[in-house]
Amino acid sequence: MTFGSPEWFFLVPALIALGWRRRGWRLHEPVRAAALILLVLALADPRLRIGGSGLDVWVLMDRSDSVAAQAASQAPEVAAILERAKRSEDRVFYIDYAVDAVRRDQGDPVLRGGTQRTRTDVALEFALAQFAPDRAARLLVVSDGYATASLGTTAEKVLRSGVPLDYRLSGGEGGPDYRAGQVEVPSRVLPGEAFLVEFSIAGNVDGAVPWEVSREDRVAAQGVAQVRGGVAHVRLTDRLGGNGAVRYVVRVKPAQDAHPENNQADAWVEVAGGPRVVLVTNYPDDPLAALLRAQGLAVDLVTEPGRLVPPSLTGARLVVINNVPASRVAPEFLGALEFFVREQGGGLLMAGGQNSFGSGGYFSSAIDPLLPVSMELRKEHRKLATAMSIVLDRSGSMAASAGAGVTKMDLANSGTARAIELLGEFDAVSIHAVDSAPHEIVGLAQVSGNRGRMIDAVRRIQSTGGGIYVYEGLKAGWAQLKKAETGQRHLILFADAADAEEPGDYKNLLEEMRAEGATVSVIGLGSPTDSDAAFLRDVAERGGGRIFFNANAGDLPEIFAQETVSVARSAFIKEVTPTLGTPGWTEIAARTPQWPAAVDAYNLGYLRPEATASLVTTDEYQAPLVAAWARGAGRVAAVAFPLGGPHSDRARAWPGYGDFVQTLTRWLAGEDTPPGMALRTRVDGDRLALELLYDDTWAARVAQTPPVAMLAVSGADRSKDEVRPLVWERIEPGRFQASAMLEPDRRVRGVVRVGAAALPFGPLAPGGSAEWSFEAERVQELRHLSMRSGGVERLDLASIWDAPRAVNYRGIRGWLLVAWLVLLLTDAALTQLDVSLLPRRRSGG
């Protein structure tokens, strides 16, 4: 019943008549009549019409990779049609979506989750939360319909909302389309074990499709598959030797293809060949290799550390870094060591030398927090003041955004400021900003008393356009260094690896600098394959310094810090130094070794609060020579004296050398996982499934310490991992399951831990790109939901304004009952008042 209907003309008088008890009303009687009327109205459950005749249309525009080009061209047309056809009281809102969703008229229009998936379900839920309750509304999805996830429970939410869902399918490119299906391989094999490599090729047209399979970036097999009935299956056999992870990549190469983006799929296989050590070393004949092999460990001797990647850690129990500078090790590999140690329970050992610890640029690196010794500068331990000249590229390319509201120039300024902060009071520094000419920002001056002024000046440097004239910058920096009276002079050149112009007579200039004892290092923003990278590398080599290439401007402050510390301190002490043993070794082994009486040289460091030193120097520093500690599930040790190469004669002549190395590395490698527990991993499309199985011998331990599963997802810049926990589901006694969605182009490593036992796994990656799989059932799902909600396919977008507009009513029973209760209480109060007045009325009568 609604207000205005004929029933009200009969109901209201009848209710009034019921309350008319005699000719004269008493105080409470009108109130009681009104209460009775409200109660009857509440029981009738009347509803009020709300809102006007206006309609809100919510346009969900698919911006994912597979339709990005079409969406960019269609969006203005869609908006023009809808705006032109709507009435004055109508409104239209635009939501762009891919992995996540944003309103075009609110906030940041950037899809921060990326565009590599089509999450129509996310966009629908986002839109449902925006609706005005007093307005009629319709949803309009503009997409190719190929979502990468099922609508699931979102469909029910749309139906419960009562809002019709219309759709407009944007057609993709026509013609033949072939795609590589998921590569099926076992997750783990033994060395020499035969196994199958299987994959499928799907296509919308039958025909012959060439394919090839690469193993570790080398073609291992190729052929031609016949697609019949929309699919072809290929099966191969292979064997692998050695240890570690091997990547298989399948590529299909049709002559014509509408979507080449889905022509590749890959998979990883782990070769489980027993405990393994990754020995990253400067020495092809490293003496540590023989000692490690004598313990039954498989040793990967790595002398080209720039080629290391996180999958290099697969199957490894220990990583040894022996006198290799941080600048030569791939940042992605260094970043992966954090998860390898803390979560997967791996071991890490850094040995001393001129290219290790602070001297090797490891200060403020990804593994600095892992080491049991710190490498910061301490005034009381400085031996020699340093004069440093920093030459900064301020060309036009430095004005580009680096994200988070800062430019590349801002980050270079921050790096320079960090370098000034790390210099000692008696060090001197000069700063030049260079475009087509050098501009003096800070003339050579001692840091003491000037540090704040220097940092303020540096932070005001701005990009002014043009290119960078490298020779002019080097020349200006060297002119300043010539004024220095200190014995150590160093120049840092920061330049764009793709835009470093005018080399000039740099070779003779660098020859002069080297003859005078000065050195030059280069920080190149970009990759080693950029157009001017070879030139910058030559500058560093001729200057006797280091070369850094990094495409992520966010790492610049860290790189400046590493280079400053490695140069500005005498961190590697080349003096024969006596040693002293401490009780700390008992945490590693029961028997204390007969320590060497002295070492030829060592890296100066400082013991961290929670670490334990087993051997220290007896000089003025009392510095730790052997230090260790536990980090998460893993263990880390630092041996500050060289174990090979120059300055290692006394160490290698030490009778206990071999036993020391073997005992320490055994402790770092940890214990074998006891039998009775196994982990299964499987990748199905973009879904990772884990299954943990254990027998009765593990039941009590699992009950006391439930299993923990962690994933390390490779970050966008490849130097930092995102660590995520997984949630286990107990299926039955002795069996747990967990799952996670894998993201395109992002590799994962993981571990399952039960107490101290760790079961590492990975690397793993999605079997193929869901964005380019074009699953027809997703389109059918959208059509079905539209039909059930009362929507249609909108070929004519303007016709959406002619659609029936739902009339919204809101019940007012609750408000009527509240009013009835108020009147009921009022009636009771007035009744008492009438009773008190009754004797007075009678006496007056």
Image (cartoon, rainbow, N blue to C red):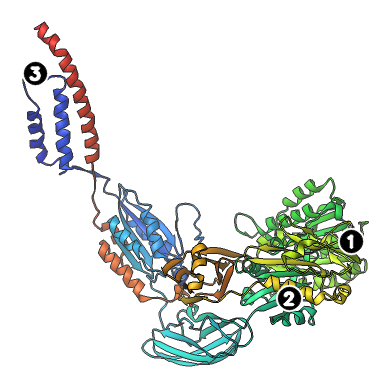
Residue type indicated by callout 2:
Val
User: Which one is in front, 758 or 379?
Assistant: 758
Does residue 435 appear in the picture of this structure? no
Q: Position of residue 491 (x, y in %)?
A: 83, 62
Give whichever of 30, 548 is nearer the camera. 30
Q: Position of residue 436 (x, y in %)?
A: 77, 62
Where residue 160 sits: x, y (%)? Answer: 28, 57
Q: Quadrant of the C terminus?
A: top left
Residue 280 has which mark?
Answer: 2
Q: Can you give x and y, in whole percent of width and height, for residue 370 in the image?
A: 69, 63
Q: How many marks?
A: 3
Q: Residue furthest top?
A: 844
Alpha carbon separation for disc pair 1 and 3: 112 Å
CB under 8 Å between discs 1 and 3: no
Question: Mark 3 or mark 2: which comes first in sequence?
Answer: 3
Question: In the depicted view, which residue is nearer to us: 324 or 588?
Answer: 588
Q: Which mark is residue 497?
A: none
* Disc nearer the start of the sequence (1/3): 3
Which type of secondary structure does the marked residue at label 2 adopt?
strand
Amino acid carrying mark 3 in the image? Gly
Q: Residue at x 38, y 90 (%)?
A: 228
Pointer 1: what residue?
488
